[in-house]
Amino acid sequence: MSDPTRGYLTLASGSARYLEMGVDMALSLREHTGHPIGLVCDEEIAEITMTTYPTVFDEVTPIGADFRKGRTRKYGVAEACAWDEAVFVDADCMVLGALDHAFDALAAAPMAFLGEILSRDDDEIHHGFSTRQLMRTFELDHYLKTNSGLFAFRKAEAEEIMRACLRCFLSEARPKLRLSLLRGAWLGDEIAIGIVGGRRKLQPLPKPAEMYWPSEFASLDPERPTKPLLHFIWPLPTRTFTKLMRMAEDRREAAGVPWPGAGHWVVEQTKLKRMARRRRWLERLRIW
């Protein structure tokens, strides 16, 4: 493909709160790219978007019927994509710097995820699961430990890969890992991506990693970032959260986009605080 069309995608489905976060993410991304930005969503979210935020996204496309249940939604973004190549950014992110170089990974691979490839010599915890045990359970030599908040893909190949992730989630991961959920593990979309990625030797995005990790949140200054992506995967310090909300409000005002207040992010921050308390409790009990 000599001159592929390219764009960014995010996802909002099931709750208008995800749309509000996606709007803030898209406006932060606009500051760092000239590529179009698309939204994959259900019909209800599409209607709100076209009525309230018609200028934020360049494309609004429906998520396929096969991908509308539970944790399977993200597997549908490739089929909904309007471009030959895309970089996906989760709605619950803020973009602090340029991400266009993520497209470069597609010169050598059909998909590239944020994360690392592990072998059976490694044993890490991924959402409460031992990666070594996952490799034994699913007869893998490798496992792709990923955060699916950022990944790049070529549409043609990614459609089939994500279909494989959907089948893996429904027919393998969910039935075989059901008992692990009773001890606090979390079965999200990333486990099936890890299994399929390990089988297919999918490579991670080149390092250094683009995303701030929770251990770095305390030192994060949104006005002087050292990494281009912040994913809300852990509660932020209050001063950092407050500064990010002011920046989001300023972007909306500059773009002529309504600001409903920071309630959608406050709910997310509250959920993350509960999750952090629960994880610390599980770790103290050595369940993980």
Image (spheres, helix red, strand yellow):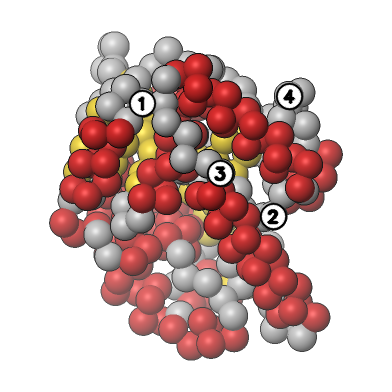
Cα separation between marks 2 and 4: 19 Å
Point out the residue furthest to the left here. Answer: 65
Cα separation between marks 3 and 1: 18 Å
Q: Quadrant of residue 127?
A: bottom right
Within 10 angstroms of label 4, few (less than 14), some, or many (20 or more) residues? Answer: few
- Which residue is pictured at 25% across the width and 59% down the height? 68
- Which residue is pictured at 43% across the width and 56% down the height? 193
Pointers 4 and 3 in contact (C-beta within 8 Å): no
Pointers 4 and 1 in contact (C-beta within 8 Å): no
Per the image, the residue denoted by label 2 is 235
Q: Nearer the viewer, mark 2 or mark 3?
A: 3
User: Is residue 126 or residue 227 the one in the foreground?
Assistant: 227
Q: Amino acid at mark 2?
A: Pro
Using the image, tell me which numbered label, if any, was put on residue 223.
4
Cα separation between marks 2 and 1: 27 Å
Q: Secondary structure under badge 4?
A: loop
User: Is residue 221 or residue 167 the one in the foreground?
Assistant: 221
Q: Nearer the viewer, mark 3 or mark 1?
A: 3
Pointers 2 and 1 in contact (C-beta within 8 Å): no
